[in-house]
Every structure is written in C-alpha cells, then in structure tokens.
Image: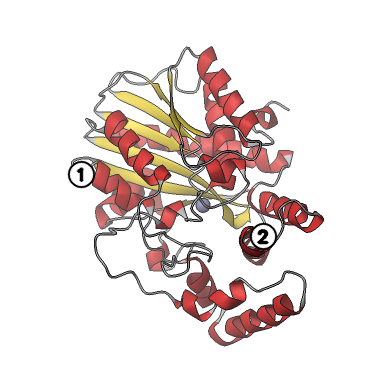
C-alpha cells in the first residue's frame, strides 16, 4: 500500500525517507545537529529543514513533525508523502512551504514524548525571565504519577489514589492536572522545563530564518494521542488574533482548549507563544493537527510508564521493552487504516491552509 510506505518504523528510517524524498525533488536540506543527545541506536540527531519555493516570500506555510518526539511518526509520514507526491509543485509565486522534520529528534528516536531534558516542548515556550510559574494541580498527584515500583505494591497504591482523584474531581480535572503543564517536578510528566530547550531555540531560529520576511504564516503542527482513533482535530491556540485567523482558514471545526471545546485540556507555555515571539510582525494561523490513537487512559498510562522507566526502571529489561512498546503504540498505531486516515486528513487540512494563505491580504 503506497500511503503506508510514507511512514517508518523508527527515527533513522523516517529521516532517511525524508532526506531521500527531498533529494528526489532537488531540495536543499538544512540539518541542525542536536549537540546534547544521541539517538536510540547511538546515531546523531537532527532537525532537518527543507523549503519548497523561493526564499523571502510574503506567505509561508510551515509543516512541523515531532514536536512531541514519538508523535513524529505521524507528521514525518505526511511530510514524506507530500514530497513523494509532488504536492507543492504548483505554489503561487509569493508562497513557500517549509518542512521542519523531527523538531524533537531525541524523543522521536527514543520513542519518548519529551526532549533530552525530560521537557514537554509544547509547555516550554514560557517567558522564563519572569520568576513566577503558572500554578498547577499536578503537585497533588506527582507522587502517584511516579511510584517507586511499576507492577508492584507502590504502583497499585498509587493507582488507587489516582482513581480516587478522578472519582472526586472528574476525568476532565484529572486530565488538566496531569497534562496542563507543570514547572515544579523535573522528574514528572508534562514538565515545561526551566529554560528554553535546544528544540525551542532551534525552532525559533528556523522561523526567523525561513519565515522572517513573511506577512502571513500558517503552521500545521502534527500531533497524536488525543481524540477518536484516526480523526484529526484542529486545535487553535495562542493569542485571540491567532485563533481568529485559524477560524477564518479552517472554519467552525477549529477547537479551543481554553473554551473547553477540545479534546485537549487548557495548556500553558505552548509553542504558539514562541511563534509570536519569533515572528512579531506576521499574522499567524497556527493549528495543532491532533490525531486520535488509543483511549485517553491508555495513552496517559503509557506516558506514566515511560517516565517511570527512565527515572526508576531498567531500560534494558523485559519490562523496559514492554513499556517502550506501549508508548510507541499509544502514539503511533502501526496500522494501514490509521495511516490512510492520517494521510487523507493531512491532505485536506494542508489544502485549506494553502487556500487561506492565497486569500490572505
Ligand atoms: Zn503532542
């Protein structure tokens, strides 16, 4: 099946397919080495950038994969598919498309959602010069999120505590406490860090370089793990101007975590704020294209297990391999029907973005 061939089994293969597809289109690739980490096979880790169309255009569309590492299988497959199918062969002359492959290559290679510093990149775009951090209910549950054992008595007791939180406060409140973003527990999940990570710095520098002259910039940031299996939700964020432009381009299907209409909880420190900082003069239409995989409890359990493994477990063990296969499956259902759904939605959404760009003043 052709569509499935765009997708890969690991970061090395995904990068290879992306670079090969760029080569077939005679595109230059700008490879940014992450100097702080190595991959799961000991390989060097890169964020790779390719531009279709001329430099310094008035309108730019940015397609990003791997903001959340392991979620990169999805976006990488779409990027490679677009290149192989020559999807951007007929761009208007004032439009360029920039593909940013594996924004968090460490997480992609190691099948983790976080960066090499255990940071959730999409909570890392905070103004760290301000000493106060956003409040989070996460402190109520951290000790249960990271129990002393996994599969033993501490884990069982922690699960009971989490279940009673859900029983008392409800699943939405639990999801917000877990995933909203926290800045106090560096060994916790959805940790936003205490400084900009390498991926954060790299992304903002890429934006300035590749979209710095544009008046209008659309961004599609590929994510997985929330919502119904295979469905791609369009989640807007950032300033009200950003949300308004996203709605102009994509219509009423756009959801907003702050308004309670999204499968995502309200978040802090998200990437839209980094985009605004890097491109202060542009009008921006950002969406997270969030594809469903497994049910929420399964996804959160897989994330918790992965975090436990790196802090208290043994990677090279049967349990370690089991936990790694769980997190990979939670963010990348390696099935043809899922990939077909990803691909057709990616084409539709990208088409809407190009139409929106064309109409932009
Ligand atoms: Zn994500």
Indicate the position of residue 353 as horizontal and vertical percent values. Answer: 39, 37
- How many marks on residues? 2
Residue at 45%, 35% (x, y): give it.
350
Q: Give left or right: position of 202 versus 68.
A: left
Viewer-nearest residue: 48 or 56: 48
148 or 358, which is in the foreground? Answer: 148
Q: Is residue 171 visible?
A: no
Residue identifier under label 2: 309
Q: Check disc 2: other Cα within 10 Å, few if <14, some if 14-19, many if 20+.
A: many
Q: What element carries label 1?
A: loop
- On whether ligand 1 comes within 8 Å of the CB at mark 2, the answer is no
Q: Where is residue 166 in the image (x, y as percent from the top left)?
A: 59, 81
Viewer-nearest of labels 2 and 1? 2
The residue labelled by disc 1 is 280
* Side (left or right) of 48 relative to 40: left
**Residue lying at 44% horizontally and 52% vertically, measured from the top left:** 121
Left/right of residue 357 with respect to residue 147 in the rendered view? left
**Residue at the right extreme, as displayed:** 318
Q: In which quarter of the image is residue 312?
A: bottom right
Q: In this view, does 248 lie above or below 46?
A: below
Residue at 39% x, 29% y: name it: 98
Q: Which is nearer the N-term, disc 2 or disc 1? A: 1
């Amino acid at each position: 099946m052709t569509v499935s061939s765009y997708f890969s089994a690991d970061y090395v293969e995904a990068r290879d397919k992306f670079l090969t597809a760029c080569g077939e289109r005679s595109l230059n690739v700008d490879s940014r080495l992450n100097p702080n980490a190595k991959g799961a096979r000991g390989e060097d880790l890169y964020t790779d950038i390719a531009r279709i169309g001329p430099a310094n255009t008035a309108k730019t569309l940015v397609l990003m994969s791997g903001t959340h590492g392991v979620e990169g299988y999805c976006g990488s497959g779409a990027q490679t598919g677009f290149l192989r199918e020559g999807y951007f062969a007929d761009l208007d002359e004032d439009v360029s498309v920039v593909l940013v492959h594996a924004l968090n290559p460490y997480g992609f290679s190691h099948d983790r959602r976080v960066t090499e510093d255990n940071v959730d990149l999409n909570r890392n775009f905070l103004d760290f010069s301000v000493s106060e951090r956003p409040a989070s209910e996460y402190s109520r549950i951290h000790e249960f999120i990271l129990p002393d054992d996994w599969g033993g008595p501490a884990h069982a007791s922690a699960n009971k505590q989490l279940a009673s939180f859900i029983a008392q406060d409800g699943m939405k409140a639990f999801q917000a406490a877990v995933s909203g973003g926290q800045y106090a527990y560096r060994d916790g999940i959805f940790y936003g860090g205490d400084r900009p990570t390498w991926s954060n710095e790299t992304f903002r520098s890429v934006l300035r370089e590749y979209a710095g002259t544009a008046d209008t910039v659309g961004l599609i940031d590929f994510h997985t793990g929330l919502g119904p299996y295979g469905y791609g939700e369009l989640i807007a964020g950032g300033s009200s101007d950003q949300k308004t432009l996203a709605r102009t381009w994509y219509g009423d299907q756009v959801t907003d975590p702050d308004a309670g209409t999204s499968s995502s909880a309200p978040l802090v420190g998200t990437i839209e704020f980094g985009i605004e900082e890097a491109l202060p003069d542009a009008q921006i239409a950002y969406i997270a294209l969030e594809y469903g995989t497994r049910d929420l409890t399964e996804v959160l359990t897989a994330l918790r297990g992965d975090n436990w493994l790196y802090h208290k477990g043994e990677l090279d063990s049967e349990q370690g391999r089991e936990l790694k296969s769980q997190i990979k499956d939670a963010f990348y259902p390696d099935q043809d029907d899922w990939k077909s759904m990803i691909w057709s939605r990616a084409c539709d959404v990208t088409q809407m973005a190009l139409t929106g760009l064309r109409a932009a003043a």
